[in-house]
Image (cartoon, rainbow, N blue to C red):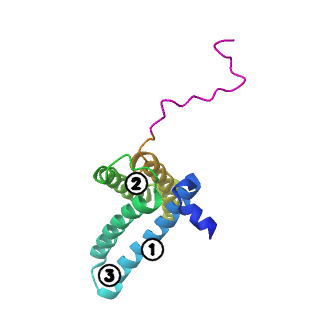
Amino acid sequence: MYAAENLRSPSSGLLGQGTRFVFAGGTVALLYVAITTLLASVVGVPFQVALAIGFSVALIVHFTVQRVFVWTHHEEFALPLPHQAARYLPVAGAQFGLTAASTALLPSVLGVPVETVYLATVAALAIASFLMFRYVIFHARPTVQDPNRVPVVKEDWPRPDA
């Protein structure tokens, strides 16, 4: 139980963020597929409409989960919610566009199945998204340095008075 609590903590660092990122992404992907499938297969909504609804719900849930679960901070976010959303939406749109373009163009050029290109694209975009979210969208406000703090000097560095 301690490991799970530690991974949820803002102090868990990169490992915690990465674990939460993978968990959140997987959960939202299952939600996306479930909503789309339920609407299309059970309710009888035309598939393209069901897909758009599923994608929209998944996008909203994904943004929310990223903000409140994955990128938790003891400090406040550097950007307010509207600015985060304004940065998040183009990243999500780019992911969709790059996935569509790569799966449409690369299989014939590389002579590999579409699924291979799709999985490689998803992996590459997941890494890129993690970095974008961590450093550009959901980053914490920088902590203020204490002006009275004395910097640490390594013993092997030459001292100015030496």
In this rendering, is residue 2 above or below 85? below
Instruction: Examine the structure image and report whether residue 158 is included in the region drawn in magenta.
Output: yes
Quarter containing the C terminus:
top right
- What SS does tag 3 mark? helix
Front label number (2 vs 1): 1
Residue denoted by label 3 = 39
Q: For this rendering, which residue is in front, 33 or 73?
A: 73
Residue denoted by label 1 = 30
User: Residue 13: which numbered mark, if any?
Assistant: none
Residue drawn at 71 percent across, 25 percent down: 155
Q: Residue furthest top?
A: 162
Residue drawn at 63 percent across, 13 percent down: 160
Residue drawn at 54 percent across, 31 percent down: 149
- What SS does tag 1 mark? helix
Q: Is 59 on the left-hand or right-hand side of 125?
A: left
Residue 122 spot, x, y in % from top left: 48, 59
Residue drawn at 59 percent across, 62 percent down: 6
Q: Is 157 on the left-hand or right-hand side of 42?
A: right
Q: For this rendering, which residue is in front, 160 or 3?
A: 160
